[in-house]
Image (cartoon, grey):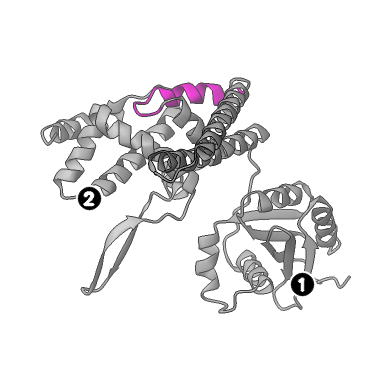
Amino acid sequence: MHKLSGDGFLSCGIDVSAAQLVVALQSEGERNLQRSFPNCARGHQALTLWLRKTGRSVRVCLEATGLYSLDLALALHAASGIEVAVLNPKLVNRFAATLCRSKTDPADAQVLAEYARRMPFQLWQPPPAVALELRTITRHIAALTQQHTRERNRLHAASVSIAGARCVQKDLKRSLRDLELRIDKLRAAALALIQQDRQLAPRLNLLVSMPGIGEVSALNLLGELALLAPSLSVRQWVAHSGLDPAHHQSGISVQKRSRISRAGNRYLRRALYMPALVAARRDPHLRAFYQALVARHKAKMQALVAVARKMLHAIFGMFRSNRNYDGSRLLPNMKLATLSTLA
């Protein structure tokens, strides 16, 4: 193998797909190398050996692509002499727009290598194994719940249609019962896993102390929040959820309505939606906050998103202080009194 000489670190970008890893290895002023490996345990081992044969430290950047990138990141993190950064794909896309117009696997790998060389490198830390297992279970529950909703809609359509066949209705009912049984078993497994962990168990109790969050919503939220690094700030939590506002203004001619960025965890946003809807009706503090925003001519969905963002702030504080939900801590007393007059 050709070795890149020098004393500095090497920059490596890896484009991850279901079956293949396309790797670009570079160092400033030196020839670039490209290889491909299968995306499996054997391929991860071969890639790690190939990088370590350079005899130099390697900084690796790859995009977060769910389970396809997770196993690779874990394998690289465990290897000596290799540092790993797992990047938000939207962040990489914005960086790529300044470098390359082509969209191919080798080009994407090259862009990631350039990112590792030019941009500040944020070292990825693997989450606890129990948190990974919990997220796997809760996301599977979410997928089954969506499937249950689709099957229930099909059953309703088949039952009201004059062309509906009884055998189809029976099959759909059987499918719904099976899905409900599977979901119940998975929720029981998730709860058992949480109760065995000294950090997750009290956090589940903290979540259900908040109006709008029941056991089902608490499981979904904890499955996503358990993987967040303890060093993150509340603003980083909001950015991770994609609930941070994105403004689009330019001069006096472009004045578009602000929207949430959506550049984050869609599972976390989805898990916050129903709790925010309930809290905006039942919690006096969040209801006053919601109604004040509507009174200021905010769209109802904008106000609901603001409630979800406020709930994320509250959860952050609850986890840090290990105290149950207290709505008065979300807003100062004087502010709350002002909002109550608008309710």
Question: Which secondary structure lies at badge 2?
Answer: loop
Q: Which residue is mark 1?
A: 34
The residue at 32%/24% (across/down) is 326
Q: Is residue 284 left or right of residue 8?
A: left
Q: Quadrant of the C terminus?
A: top left
Q: Nearer the viewer, residue 16 or 324?
A: 16
Q: Residue furthest right?
A: 1
Q: Position of residue 200 (x, y in %)?
A: 56, 26
Q: CA distance from mark 1 to mark 2?
A: 50 Å
Tell me where residue 102 appears, x and y as whole percent: 59, 78
164 vs 278, left or right, is right
Type of the residue with mark 2:
Ala
Whether residues under marks 1 and 2 lie with C-beta atoms below 8 angstroms apart, the answer is: no
Q: What residue sits right under mark 2 in the picture? A: 299
Mark closer to the chain start, 1 or 2: 1
Instruction: Measuring from the top left, give residue 79's x and y in whole percent.
Output: 79, 50
- Looking at the picture, which amino acid does disc 1 mark? Gln
Q: Which residues are magenta?
A: 197-213
Q: Report which quarter residue 30 is drawn in.
A: bottom right
Other residues around mark 1 within 10 Å, as few (<14) / some (14–19) / many (≥20): some
Whether residue 99 is situated above or below residue 307 in the rendered picture: below
| Residue 9 visible (yes or no) | no
Residue 200 lies in the magenta stretch = yes
Residue 21 visible in this rendered orientation of the protein: yes
Nearest the viewer among 8 and 16 is 16
